[in-house]
Amino acid sequence: MIEIRPITESDGAAWEPLWQAYLTFYQSSLPPEVTDATWRRFFDPAEPINALVAVLDGRIVGIVHYLYHRSTWTTADYCYLQDLFTAEEARGRGVARALIEAVYEKAKAHGAARVYWLTHESNTTAQALYDKVAARSGFIQYRHLLG
């Protein structure tokens, strides 16, 4: 049975390795101050960023981070599912799906109009799940770094 719950401050030792594994999966790294700021934001009521964890067999095996933001296309907020990661040993057991569905529930309770997310085009394993739980928008992301 997978338990999905909000992250707590006592979850730091379990969250950090999953966060670092997520960054490694996307061949990225962040300075410690960014990770520290992200962690603090989860517990700051003034911040729009949220986190849930998936617990399986008494261990945190998955994380999801999501945030709400305004849109010019609706009066309701949108929910951006920013980060989703499942520990390798727990994959194929429904953890990612349970985390996504929990974000859907949270976003609906918040009054959001939609939940959306991005994944890398090479992440075909995740896309097999995403194609079952959401519709592809057809949009292509462009970005320009400012620093």
Image: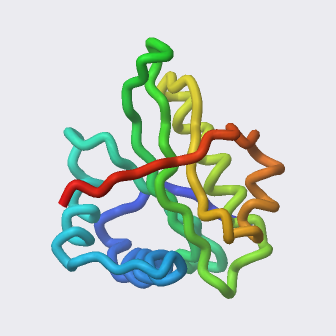
x, y percent for residue 118: 57, 53
Residue 67 visible, this angle: yes
Q: Is residue 118 left or right of residue 147?
A: right
Tell me what residue is drawn at x 20 percent, y 39 percent.
46
x, y percent for residue 23: 44, 77
Tell me what residue is drawn at x 47 percent, y 81 percent.
27
Residue 14 visible, this angle: no
Q: Is residue 58 left or right of residue 15?
A: right
Identify the image quadrant of residue 25.
bottom right
**Color encoding of the figure:** rainbow
- Tell which of 47 and 53 is nearer to you: 47
Q: In the picture, which quadrant includes the C terminus?
A: bottom left
Residue 142 vertical position relative to residue 16 in the rendered view, above or below: above
x, y percent for residue 17: 42, 84
x, y percent for residue 80: 48, 43
Identify the image quadrant of residue 39.
bottom left
- Tell which of 125 and 57 is nearer to you: 125
Q: Is residue 6 left or right of residue 123?
A: left
Report the label total.
Answer: 0
Residue 62 vertical position relative to residue 27 in the rendered view, above or below: above
- Tell which of 143 and 105 is nearer to you: 143
Q: In the picture, which quadrant includes the N terminus?
A: bottom right
Tell me what residue is drawn at x 34 percent, y 80 percent.
29
